[in-house]
Image (cartoon, rainbow, N blue to C red):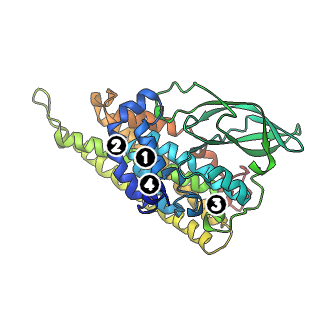
Amino acid sequence: MSALQIEAASKPALVSARELTPLIVQCRQETENHRLPAAPIVARLRTLRLCRLALGTDLYGHGMPVHEALDVYEQLSYAEASVGWIVWNNALPCMMARFLEPAARGQIFGMADSIFACSTRPTGRAEVGTDGYRVNGRWTIVSGCELAEWIMLICMIGEHEEPEQRFVFVRRGSYEIVDTWQVGGLRGTGSHDVIVKDVLVPHALTFSPGDPSKLDTPLGRVAIVCSMAAAYGAQALGIARLAIDTITGLARTKEPIEGGSSMRENPPLLALIARHTAILNAARNYLHACTRELWQTAVAGRPPDLGEITATWRAAIHAAEAAQDAVVAAYAAGGINSLYTSSPLERAHRDMHAMRRHIVGQTMWLEDAGRVMLSQPTKHPLYAL
């Protein structure tokens, strides 16, 4: 076993995330300037295999239960939202690997220090051939694409009214990256566009979301999309915790100007801190409870239960909404201090608003949760995947 494997294997992922936090904070400005996590952070993410939480140990992953992984995402996002986001973004291709045959999984995920990326937008086309699929297209907002060895993309096949979706894995060198990520929030994710031109992807490196899982482990059975949503909620909670900790610290230390009252003597602010701390803790506990139950079903060898999936969706969106409310309140309470880019409140505010634009955090998932509760069919085809 190499030194790389030994270090990751001997240390729990949450311990690694906590130990990495000072470096992430130290390199924060470099991450902002380069619109990508600073090189020392990326090196540690590779060594500690934090982008492989959702892979089994046979593929150099941590094989983490989904409810335990929430703590890792929350901690990294507390340190820097862009780092947490890239680590989270790696979980989707890792979880989707269940639909590939073992040889293909080994080809894509068999290098211990590889990082991955993906797009959830079906904006490419694939033509069926005898040797695979001929892929063309352009995908936007591919977070971490500059770091990735492999990228998972969604293509449409056929010209029918409802064409088939096909997921394909393309390797570094098979795509062009277009520098488009000129943004404020989640600036360090490097979420540029990716272009693929006439690339042949072998059948073995593609799959349909309707395929059966070829991985008979809990990670091969647990519901994917709501698990991703739960981790999204955990990231939001990490950003909110940073905002509340920042406004609390400000209230403790900031002295009044020109004889006015101090922040720590402001009753509405005191109530705000207490209220949002309680709300965030409750949302976190609910999220962990629902996700733990979802995982226990997978451990028991049963298919995902629709009621557990729905509960996880409710908890995930609730956590994200509660986190956004806390960040907005803390930002407003910070007054002029919140305007400076050196303030964690300013960064939390823009990162949170960027994060809340992602498809996994939208109201349509709650609408489908309500449909399930009324014994109606869901509308989104990936709701229970």
Q: Please state which of residues 290 and 144 is positioned toward the viewer in this rendering.
A: 144
| Residue ID at (43%, 49%) | 237
Give the residue number, with chain letter if any, for mark 4.
72
In this view, the mark in front (1 or 2)? 1
Give the residue number, with chain letter if any, for mark 3.
223
What x and y, as percent, mark residue 286? 47, 61
Amino acid identity at mark 1: Arg
What x and y, as percent, mark residue 241? 36, 48
Label 4 residue SS = helix
Amino acid identity at mark 2: Leu
Tag 3: Cα neighbours inside 10 Å, few (<14), some, or many (≥20)? many
Q: Earlier in the sequence, mark 4 or mark 3?
A: 4
Which circle marks residue 326 in the picture?
Answer: none
Q: Are marks 4 and 1 in contact (CB under 8 Å)?
A: no
Q: Are marks 4 and 3 in contact (CB under 8 Å)?
A: no
Amino acid identity at mark 4: Val
| Residue ID at (81%, 48%) | 203
Label 1 residue SS = helix
- Left or right, 186 with reference to 311: left
